[in-house]
Image: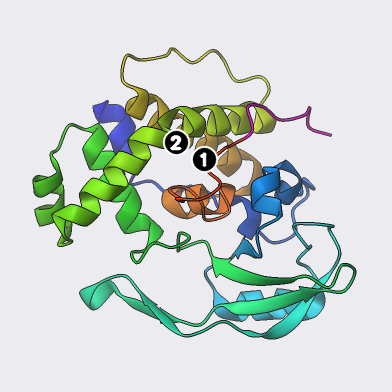
Amino acid sequence: MVALLRVLGQPLPVLNAQGPSAKVWRPWRALPTEVQDAPMRSVEADAACVEQRLLAGDYACPVCEGELRPWGFARWRIVGRGAKSVRLRPRRSRCKACRLTHVLLPVACLLRRCDLAEMVGRGLALKVAGWGYRRIAASLGIPSSTVGDRGRRFEKLAGYLRAWFTALLYFLDPSFGAIDQRDNPLADALEAIVLAAGAAARAFGPAPLWNFASGASSGRLLANTNPSLPPAFLARR
């Protein structure tokens, strides 16, 4: 467990926030139907990069894979707390083919969570390490009720998350060896996230771990709606 938690500080990838790569892979094809139907998709944390790629037509509609084009902005919001808070206004887009609109959520954020993905992930990692809610809250400077809510959500989704990220791991690296299951479902889920992030890093290059987890789940890592995740991926082509 100590070795696993040490990995959390290492730079790891963001799946659907990478630029052109020699290995062409469209991660939105692997997203669950519930996420594809949602009017939101994850993009890079760099607003200037997002704007450039949106104008160039590099983003595909998560519903029909048509070309997304600029379509105004969502409302301004503040994500995070204190000195680490970020004020942002997500871009909106519209598909040229199906005409559906989509909010482009930066991978540094999670859907309907007021803290950045890094802060949320750090709390989850401490929970897996055996810390209590109050101790985590004091360490991160957030209310214990918030920590408790996220911890309970993580517990409820642990099986889904383990299955999703394990499938993603083998989708990216079919030659990866067997993974020994632990007695702790939360540790299994966290290990699956870390291992899938490592596989993505080898394929596409490094980026922050929890940005990866946000991007790979389309921002729904701890979502209160549409929690079901697919049990497996089709063979990579």
Question: Which range of residues does the magenta coloring cover?
Answer: 230-237
Q: Which percent across, then down, holds residue 177?
A: 56, 15
Q: Can residue 25 be seen here?
A: yes
| Type of amino acid under label 1 | Ala
User: With 65 as the anchor, is 131 left or right in this view?
Assistant: left
Residue 126: name its quadrant. Answer: top left
In this picture, is 218 found above or below 99? above
Q: Are marks 2 and 1 in contact (CB under 8 Å)?
A: yes
Q: Can residue 208 be seen here?
A: no
Residue 138 forms part of the magenta stretch: no
Q: Residues within 10 Å of mark 2 (few under 14, many from 20)?
A: many
| Type of amino acid under label 2 | Val
Q: Residue furthest right?
A: 97
Distance between mark 2 and mark 1 Cα atoms: 5 Å
Q: Which percent across, then down, holds residue 138?
A: 9, 55
Residue lying at 76% horizontally and 49% vertically, measured from the top left = 26
Q: Residues within 10 Å of mark 1 (few under 14, many from 20)?
A: many
> Mark 1 highlights which residue?
197
